[in-house]
Each structure stands twice: as C-alpha cells, then as structure tokens.
Image (cartoon, rainbow, N blue to C red):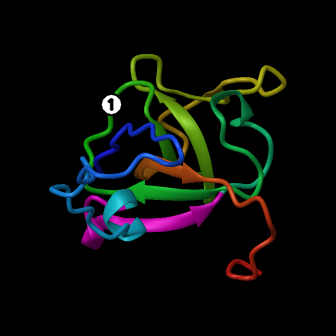
Amino acid sequence: MKVIPIYASAGITGFESPAKEYIQKPLNLHDLLIEHPSATFIGQAKGDSMQGIGIFDGDILVVDRHLTVQNHDVVVACFNGEFVCKILDLKNRRLLSANKDHEPVSITCNEMFTVEGVVSKSIRCHRPSNIYG
C-alpha cells in the first residue's frame, strides 16, 4: 500500500491531484496477514506469559508451519500434550516466557515436544469477538 503525503489547504483549486496516477489496491487482510495459506492456522493466546513482547490474553495468533524455526522465534508448540506459545531457545533447549513471573522450562529427552509453527503475527481485538466464543 502506498502512502502519499499530501497537505492541502481549503480553497486551493486549479491543479490535478498529485495522487491521480496512483491506484490503491483494495485492502485484503488475508493477503496482509497470511503468507502461506495452506500452511497457516489461527489460534488464540491464553494467559500472561508473553506480555513482554506484546502478546496478551485473547490475542489472535497467526501461526505459519511453512517457516523454518530459528533461535528465539515465538512458536506454538505441543509440550507434554499441552499447546503453548513461547519463545524457543534452540541453543539451550528451553521454552522462554516474555514475563519475568514465569520461569524458563527445559526441554529434556523425557519431554514430548513438537513445534506446531512459528507465530508470524498477532492481532489484538479491542472489542470482544464472538468468533472464538
């Protein structure tokens, strides 16, 4: 989307709009938020463990399974049968929270652990939505 900085005062006439040659594409949130549609799912954050990076309880998470996981990515993972949203510390094999009240959790060989995808985006709804009842 192109942003055209135009400053105009009331009463100015007699010239063509400088924006005449620009055609703005319609805004499509699907295209903006989802890069790999066949490998993407949507989830909802619960709890306060990721507030330090701006993910709050009730936020919508766009999770992309196509992205290669990198150290310190925010991921959705299945840890011992429970879905979690955490920062993945690959070097130290730990799940990190973004809230000092939550301790890091080690991923040992005794744990059941799978990364479900990388959180590529999060969306905050400022009014309750009945989509996720």
- Percent of width and height locating residue 3: 34, 44
The residue sitting at 40% across, 17% down in the picture is 91
Q: Nearer the viewer, residue 29 or 40?
A: 29
| Quarter of the image where one finds residue 125 | bottom right
Give above or below for 99 relative to 66: above
**In the image: residue 94, left or right of residue 82:** left
Which residue appears farthest toward the left when viewing the image?
21
**Can residue 3 be seen by looking at this rendering?**
yes
Residue 84 counted in the magenta span: no
Residue 14, percent from left and from top: 29, 52
Given residues 37 and 49, the one toward you in this image is 37
Q: Position of residue 62 (x, y in %)?
A: 47, 58
> Residue, x 75% and y 82% (percent of image)?
130
Front residue of this view, candidates 39 and 126: 126
Could you tell me which quadrant the C terminus lies in? bottom right
The answer to whether residue 82 is left or right of residue 128 is: left
Q: Is residue 51 left or right of residue 64?
A: right
Q: Residue at 15% x, 56% y: name it.
A: 21
Q: Say above or below: 44 vs 53.
A: below
Where residue 19 appears, as percent x and y from the top left, is 26, 52
Q: Which residues are magenta?
A: 34-44
Kindly identify the amino acid type of the residue bearing the numbered disc 1. Gln
Let me know if residue 113 appears in the view.
Answer: no
Tell me how many marks there are: 1
> Element type at marker 1?
loop
**Of 82 and 15, the residue lying toward us:** 15
| Left or right of residue 87, residue 40 in this image | left
Residue farthest toward the right in the current orientation of the protein: 101
Within-10-Å neighbours for mark 1: few <14, some 14–19, many 20+: few
User: Up-down: is 126 above or below 8?
Assistant: below
The residue wearing badge 1 is: 70
